[in-house]
């Protein structure tokens, strides 16, 4: 097995107040999409903070 390292651009906008996927910065959405693509798993939620209300159900 040989590791593959990928670099992604970061984002400067806070994600804490996001209520839906489209509220996230494009870079954050692209990052989540790539994780799903590489793992073959469907993302069902994304946490944007520690509070229960900071979980986006996809």
Image (spheres, rainbow, N blue to C red):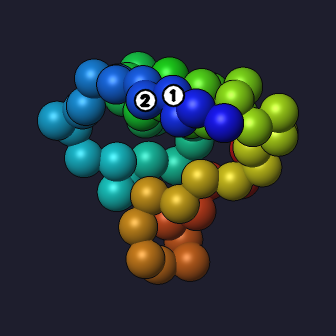
- Image location (x, y in percent) of residue 6: 42, 25
Image position of 3 (left or right of 1)? left
Q: Can you name the residue that lies furthest to the bottom here?
A: 51
Image position of 45 (left or right of 51)? right
Q: Quadrant of the N terminus?
A: top right
In the displayed structure, 37 sits above or below 54; it is above
Looking at the picture, tell me which residue is in the foreground, 24 or 30: 30
Name which residue lies at 27% across and 23% down.
9
Looking at the picture, tell me which residue is in the foreground, 27 or 57: 27
Q: Residues within 10 Å of mark 1 (few under 14, many from 20)?
A: few
Image position of 38 (left or right of 7)? right
Name which residue lies at 34% across and 57% down.
16
At numbered mark 2, what does the secondary structure look like: helix, strand or loop?
loop
Does residue 20 appear in the picture of this structure?
A: yes
Per the model, the C-alpha gap separating discs 2 and 1 is 4 Å
Name which residue lies at 41% across and 67% down.
49
- Image location (x, y in percent) of residue 5: 43, 29
In the displayed structure, 43 sits above or below 22; it is below
Report the disc number at residue 4: 1
Q: Residues within 10 Å of mark 2 (few under 14, many from 20)?
A: few
At numbered mark 1, what does the secondary structure look like: helix, strand or loop?
loop
- Image location (x, y in percent) of residue 31: 49, 30
Report the disc number at residue 38: none
- Image location (x, y in percent) of residue 44: 78, 49
Name which residue lies at 34% across and 25% down.
7
Q: Are marks 2 and 1 in contact (CB under 8 Å)?
A: yes
Q: Mark 2 = which residue?
A: 5
Q: Quadrant of the C terminus?
A: top right
Image position of 24 (left or right of 43)? left
């Amino acid at each position: 097995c040989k590791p593959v390292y990928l670099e992604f651009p970061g984002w400067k906008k806070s994600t804490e107040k996001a209520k839906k996927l489209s509220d996230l910065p494009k870079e954050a959405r692209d990052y989540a999409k790539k994780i799903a693509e590489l793992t073959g798993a469907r993302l069902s939620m994304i946490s944007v903070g520690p509070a229960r209300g900071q979980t986006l159900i996809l």
